[in-house]
Image (cartoon, grey):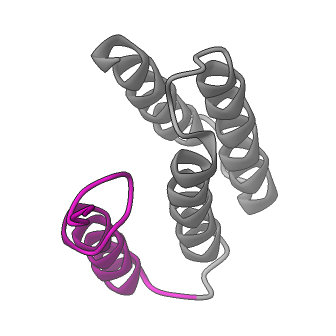
């Protein structure tokens, strides 16, 4: 399972690096959406991964990235939002962390 998340992480890093090639904000949004689609294709191949929770998390990350790319929110606010999303994922019930089942 760790291998698939390393692949998703590599796709996200590649998309971020690709953004430095283009100066158009709409291209950045296209790159973000392409990365989300590639991550969906990678995760869909593995039946043991909870696709709904994983895509909800990745969709929220993409939304934050698009808002920062378009200048709707600043970079600092975007970083705080990503940290809040990460804290929710770990402590508040996202992707299996923080929930206790009886």
Residue 93 versus residue 4 in the image, above or below = below
**Viewport quadrant of the N terminus:** top left
Q: Residue at x 62, y 58 (%)?
A: 59
Residue 17 point in image, percent of width and height = 47, 33
Q: Residue at x 72, y 61 (%)?
A: 25
Dividing the picture into quadrants, the one containing residue 67 is bottom right
Residue 9 point in image, percent of width and height = 39, 30
| Front one among 13 and 53 | 53
Q: Residue at x 64, y 66 (%)?
A: 66
Residue 100 in the magenta stretch? The answer is yes
| Front one among 61 and 16 | 61
Residue 54 point in image, percent of width and height = 52, 46
Residue 94 in the magenta stretch? The answer is yes
Dividing the picture into quadrants, the one containing residue 40 is top right
**Viewport quadrant of the C terminus:** bottom left
| Front one among 69 and 97 | 97
- The magenta-colored residue range is 73-102
Residue 57 versus residue 27 in the image, above or below = below
Toward the front, the furthest residue is: 102
Residue 38 point in image, percent of width and height = 69, 27
Dividing the picture into quadrants, the one containing residue 79 is bottom left
Q: Residue at x 34, y 11 (%)?
A: 3
Relative side of 81 to 101, left or right: right
Relative side of 78 to 51, left or right: left
């Amino acid at each position: 399972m760790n291998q698939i998340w390393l692949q998703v992480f590599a796709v996200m890093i590649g998309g971020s690096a690709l953004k430095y090639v283009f100066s158009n904000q709409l291209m950045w949004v296209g790159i973000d959406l392409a990365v989300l689609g590639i991550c969906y294709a990678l995760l869909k191949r593995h039946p043991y991964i909870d696709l709904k929770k994983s895509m909800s998390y990745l969709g929220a990350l993409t939304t934050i990235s698009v808002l920062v790319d378009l200048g709707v929110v600043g970079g600092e606010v975007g970083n705080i939002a990503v940290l809040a999303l990460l804290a929710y994922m770990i402590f508040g019930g996202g992707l299996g962390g923080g929930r206790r089942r009886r």
